[in-house]
Image (cartoon, rainbow, N blue to C red):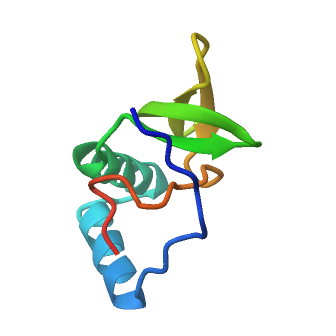
Amino acid sequence: MKEVKPKRAAKFTVKYLDKLIEEATTDAYNESEQVSGFFSLIEDNLDVPFTTRVLGQVVTVTGIDITENDQIVAICRPGNTAQSISVLDLPMPAPLPEGVNG
């Protein structure tokens, strides 16, 4: 797998982000259901594995998960070990992996 170095964060339009939010939260009645909607959207569309850097170390993102307290995390492997990192804290590589549109 080719190592991809992160550059800067992708810029998404407000219209595009609003569309994603609406898609993820349709029929969600509370915050937990909204998080589940975002998780499903990411899980259905993000092409894993891909590589990025976390704290200067190359890691392979092998999947995503949702914790018992409704946090969406990326499963990162710098080798044979795995570490969960909040998707909000995960630097995205450039170019972006399949399933991330801008």
**Does residue 52 show up?**
yes
| Image x and y of residue 83, in percent | 63, 24
Tell me if residue 43 comes above or below residue 97 in the rendering: above
Q: Residue furthest front?
A: 2
Q: Residue at x 60, y 30 (%)?
A: 84
Judge by depth and name the residue closer to the eye, 50 or 2. Answer: 2
Determine whether, in the image, residue 53 is placed left or right of residue 33.
right
Q: Residue at x 45, y 49 (%)?
A: 32
| Image x and y of residue 12, in percent | 43, 80
| Image x and y of residue 96, in percent | 40, 59
Judge by depth and name the residue closer to the eye, 27 or 64. Answer: 64
Tell me the quadrant of the picture where the C terminus can be found. Answer: bottom left
Determine whether, in the image, residue 89 is placed left or right of residue 43.
right
How many numbered badges does the structure rendering display? 0
Q: Residue furthest top?
A: 80
Determine whether, in the image, residue 10 is placed left or right of residue 17.
right
Judge by depth and name the residue closer to the eye, 101 or 1. Answer: 1
**Does residue 66 show up?**
no
Tell me the quadrant of the picture where the N terminus can be found. Answer: top left
Q: Which residue is drawn at 30% across and 62% down?
A: 24
| Image x and y of residue 29, in percent | 35, 59
Q: Residue at x 24, y 51 (%)?
A: 45
